Image (cartoon, grey):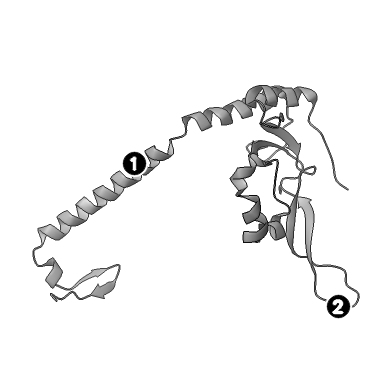
Amino acid sequence: MRELHEPTQSVVDSLTRAGGLNRFGEPNYRAVWGWNRLTFIGGKWEQDNADGKPAEYALRRVPKYPQLNRWHIEKWCPPEMYGSPWTWCNGSTMERELGPYPERGEYEHCFTLDGPRGEFIQLTPTVAEYIARAIERSRATKPKKHTLYSREARKDKEYLDWADMVMDDNATWAYTPHSYGGIKHEHSNT
């Protein structure tokens, strides 16, 4: 027996106001009850076989979230985020494991609404709008990809400079035995 709930229209309106609409005219954010949210999972399932045959492969719809009796906020992701339809259906096992290609995109998990000790919290329009706006703000302040690459390149350069300095301090470094993490290496001048 599953406990099913739908968000109130005021919650839907608050999420739409905070996140806008996607290119299909649907809200970018939505609230779903854990028991309501099903997803495809493919694999071999234990079945009641009186004849003792092994389980057969099947694609089933199962609850997506382990927190079944909680509200979840999801954000819409465009179909291209999942690769091309050809790759999904022909170039990998995605269709076999996750079902058909999400041609209209898919909603992905952003937030589970519960208290600090895991207790139930009721979803209200104010809470829903606050969560969606906080997610949008965090997306706007997230470091850009080039910033992350620059930081990593700077760290790599600092390490190489340090390694050069250590090796330059010992003129006989290349000609003497030394170890890294307990493994002894011998270098020769050849």
Which residue of the protein is positioned furthest toward the left in this rendering? 171
Which one is nearer the viewer's eye here, 93 or 86?
86
Residue 35 visible from this viewpoint = yes
Relative to 135, is 148 on the left or the right?
left
**Mark 2 crowd level (few <14, some 14–19, many ≥20, 10 Å Cα):** few
**Mark 1 crowd level (few <14, some 14–19, many ≥20, 10 Å Cα):** few
Label 1 amino acid?
Answer: Ser
Which one is nearer the viewer's eye here, 130 or 154?
154
Residue drawn at (62%, 37%), measured in percent from left and top?
116
Relative to 106, is 142 on the left or the right?
left
Marking on residue 132:
none
Q: Is residue 37 above or below residue 49?
A: above
Q: Position of residue 5 (x, y in %)?
A: 82, 36
Q: Is residue 48 above or below residue 66?
A: below
Residue drawn at (76%, 45%), measured in percent from left and top?
68
Q: Is residue 185 above or below residue 19?
A: below
Q: Secondary structure at mark 1?
A: helix
Residue drawn at (84%, 67%), measured in percent from left and top?
47
Label 2 amino acid?
Answer: Gly
Marking on residue 150:
1
Q: Position of residue 153 (x, y in %)?
A: 31, 46
Q: Is residue 138 above or below residue 95?
A: above
Relative to 39, is 4 on the left or the right?
right
Closer to the eye: label 1 or 2: 1
Which one is nearer the viewer's eye here, 10 or 76?
76
Which residue of the protein is positioned furthest toward the front in this rendering? 86
Q: Position of residue 57 (x, y in %)?
A: 77, 66
Q: Which of the 4 image quadrants contains residue 96?
A: bottom right
Which one is nearer the viewer's eye here, 18 or 86?
86
Residue 92 visible from this viewpoint = no
Name the residue tied to disc 2. 52
